[in-house]
Amino acid sequence: MDTEKVLVVSADLLPLPPTSYVTGAGQIQSILDICSKNCRFMPRKQAEVNPAYKQLIPYVTVICRREILYLERTSAQSEARLHGKGSLGVGGHINPTDQGRDLGTTIANALTRELQEELWLSDPGNPWLAGLINDDSTSVGSVHLGLHYILHVEHKPEIRETDKMTARWLSYPRLKSLSQRMETWSRILLPSLASAARL
């Protein structure tokens, strides 16, 4: 029996446009403060079908020497709504085992765990919070809020779950040509990577 619990916050409390990528430091902090005071754990089966709540999802874009990790999900992944879609993020749900002394620590624990589960990454480095992704236009997006981090690495890590996804390292111009194959979150955040990929 699936008893997984995930961290959620009431969608009504979050001042987010229906489809957006929030980058303003003040607005990001305000939203995270709301989440910190109002988040709780809920059975995932309930959360996935209830747009009254947003599941908080750390979502990390990995960049190595101006190339960005591009993943395509296979039919072996559990989330059928994303099969065949391209993704610019590694991440997943926040579970009770990730819980720390505050929301920031809890998010960091979940982010580190997800990176280690999905990539052969010797050093998770220092991901930085670039923005928040919201998309109420799809059944997946309407129940999730993306906490978008960017991680620069010195060496390209391999993916662990090769049955669930394929990976390529691509330049920003090449990614733009693939945008129509991407999940909505990746299309929303893609423009923000133009400058990040040149760092």
Image (cartoon, helix red, strand yellow):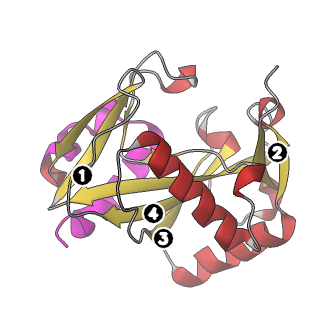
Disc 4 marks which amino acid?
A: Tyr
Front tag of 2 and 1: 1
Percent across and percent down for residue 192 are 33, 63
Label whose residue precedes the other's in the sequence (2 or 1): 2
Marks 1,4: beta carbons within 8 A: no
Residue 35 image offset from top left, x and y in percent: 76, 66
Sequence-wise, which precedes: disc 3 or disc 2? 2
Looking at the rendering, which quadrant does residue 109 occupy? bottom right
Tag shown at residue 68: 1
Label annotation for residue 149: 4
Count of labels shown? 4
- Residue for point 64% across, 31% down: 139
Residue under label 3: 129
Q: Is residue 171 magenta?
A: no
Q: Is residue 96 above or below residue 109?
A: above
**In the image, farthest residue toward the top:** 75
Q: Is residue 55 left or right of residue 80?
A: right
Closer to the camera in the image, 39 or 152: 152
The three-letter amino acid code for the residue at tag 2 is Ala
- Look at 82% across and 57% down and name the residue there: 12
Disc number placed over residue 182 in the picture, else none = none
